[in-house]
Each structure stands twice: as structure tokens, then as C-alpha cells.
Amino acid sequence: EKGTYPHFMLKEIDEQPFVIRNIIQKYQNKDGTVRLDEDIRNAMKSSDRIYIIAAGTSYHAGLVGKQLIEKIAQRPVEVHIASEFLYNMPLLSENPLFIFISQSGETADLRGVLVDVKEKGYKALTITNVPGSTLSREADFTLHTYAGPEIAVASTKAYTAQMAVLTLLAVDTANAKGIKLDFDPIQELGIVASAMETLCDQKERLEQIARDYLAVTRNCFFIGRAADYFVCLEGALKLKEISYIQAEGFAGGELKHGTIALIEDGTPVIAIATQEHVNLSIRGNVKEVAARGANPCIISMEGLEHDGDAFVIPKVHEHLTSLATVIPLQLISYYAALHRDCDVDKPRNLAKSVTVE
Ligand code: F6R
């Protein structure tokens, strides 16, 4: 039920702080430490390389998951688009573990890979919002994202839930390996949930940004570096699918290798700047596009903001920035779609779960 909300998408965006708190509750011990299923921990610990398989928004969560697992648990990870993996399989390591990330647990492209790798005798873990789903039943292990039913076609809370669960999976693996963490994951996820609340309270400002930058444009670019690049891919997908504005997410430094030719007078470029080590270089990229007429909109993070930034996100831990940054991008897409009279919850040509290959 939508309750007082005009759209499921807006309701589901607003639910994200609760979803994160729910996940924390489900996956913590009484003493405040993280603990996942013993079998999952052993599978993560004994595998020499993790292969994340996913599609669409879940693939974007997988890209963030790779960073989390590599940085926190020091395990090598590859991320693959499900529909490509079967036909273009990489050389596998000796003891791979497959992680399938799927909101619905029904995506046919993922199932094709799951069936194939199970036949080969490999272990599989499904991270899903629907524990009884096909991908959950057919995998060896399941991690539940506890986001509650996601009705809007555009995925929002499932994405942040996936990243939160991937964080806990990385932390649990680090614990199992005896790696000492320099942050308290439960506390930092709590800070993320509060930041999400603050962000969800800034709808008027984000609606204004959508109106200023996206009301009439044909196209839009999202640029970011390091972790911000992955959230740019997700921001662009969200905008495309519900507002039909052609959008692309780009690594800040890559734009000049061709795509900058598309920048014209007034082209909106949404730049994300939440990463300290690339703050100046992404701002350099903004200057490059501005010099070619672009209309830049900088979304930065507390402590890294400069005068003239359009929007500032509350500070969260550097591993977890994507969970906060995506909220303004989701809301900007939502308001852009509203301004353009699009059917927010049921965009054209799309279905909630894609059960054909
Ligand atoms: C985008 C979106 C899709 C799905 C993709 C995978 O908002 O919803 O890109 O993320 O079809 O679906 P799941 O996660 O159900 O496997």
C-alpha cells in the first residue's frame, strides 16, 4: 500500500533509513558484533576469488560490493553482468565462490549462470530480497536484504539494502580472517541511516535541482571518480528509466577521451564529489566541461564542499558513501520524471522482474 504517498517509488526512497536499521538488527549479535551464517563465513573464507554476478541496479551494487570486500576483507573480487558471463566466461580461479545479487531472485540471466556454475560443482550464495525465490532456492546459501516488498519498477531501497548486506558480508569475512578493522561497521551504518533521513528531508531542494537542470534537457551526464563513479552509473540508470532523459554515468577522467564531444551549451553534468583523494581531480573535470558550456551541478560531501556546490551530503564513512549519495540521485530522478509527466512507478517498456533471457 502506498498510504499517503503519491508513488511507490517515493515511499520506497523514504523507507531506506528503516531498511538499513532493520538490516543492522537482523545481522548483529547481542554484543553488537556482526555475525553471518557459519556456512557462508566458511565459504567466503576458503574461496580464493569471488565472482559477483548481477544485472542492472543490482550490478551497480555489485561494483560497490567488490570494493567493500576487497578493502575490508582483502579478498579479490570480479563483478560480471549476468547476460554476458555465460557467453564470455573469464578464466576461473581454483576455488571460486559465486555471489548472485538479485532483488527479485527471479532474473533469468542470473539463473542461467547459476545453473551452469552449479553443474560445474561450484558454491553459490544469493543475496536477495525474496528468500523463497528461484535464485535463493537453487543456491547453496542465501543472504536476505530485508528491504520489504519493492513495488516501483525502479529499484531504490533494494540497492541500498544490497550494499549494506555486502558491507556486513565483507566485515564478517574480515573477522573470520582475523583482519582488524579500523572502524565500527554497525555504528557507521547507523550514521548512514541518519544521513539518509537528513537527505530524505531535503526533497524541496532536490526538486528545485531537478527543475533547474533537467526540466527540458535531452541528455545528462553523471561524473565521478573512484566509488563515486559507481553511483554515477546508478544515477544515470535511474534517470533514464523513469524520466526517459538520455543519461550516462562516466568516470571523471574518461570523459575527455571522446564523450566530451557531446557537451554543448547547457548540457547538465551532475558531478559527485564525496571522495577526498579525488576531490580536486573531479573538480578539475567539472572545469573542463564547464569550459565547453556545460551546466555543472556538484553534489559533494560535508568536509569536502566548495562554494557554489549545488548540494552537500552529510558525512558518512568513506566505504559507505554510495549508500548516502544515491538518495539525492534517486530523488532528482523522481522529480525530473514528475516534471516531465512520466509514469514514475511503471515506466514504459519495463517490467519489475525480467524472467526472459
Ligand atoms: C533498475 C532495475 C533493474 C534491475 C535488474 C535486476 O531500477 O530495477 O535494472 O535491477 O533488472 O533485477 P534483480 O535485482 O531483480 O535481479
Image (cartoon, rainbow, N blue to C red):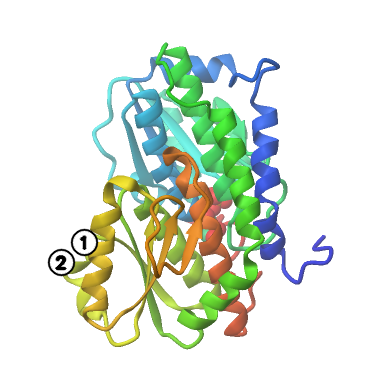
Depth check: give the residue in front, 302 or 62.
302
Please name the residue that numbered disc 2 is placed on.
257
**The residue positioned farthest toward the top in the image shown:** 178
**Residue at coordinates 43% horizontally, 31% vertically from top-left?**
98
**The residue positioned farthest toward the left in the image shown:** 257
Q: Secondary structure at mark 2?
A: helix
**Within 10 angstroms of label 1, few (less than 14), some, or many (20 or more) residues?**
some
Find out whether the residues at labels 2 and 1 contact each other: C-beta distance under 8 Å.
yes
Measured as percent of width and height from the top left, residue 298 is found at 39, 66
**Residue at coordinates 17% horizontally, 68% vertically from top-left?**
256
Q: Secondary structure at mark 1?
A: loop
Among the 4 quarters of the image, the one containing residue 287 = bottom left
Q: Is residue 350 visible?
A: no
Indicate whether 84 appears above or below 11.
Answer: above
Measured as percent of width and height from the top left, residue 219 is found at 39, 80
Among the 4 quarters of the image, the one containing residue 283 = bottom left
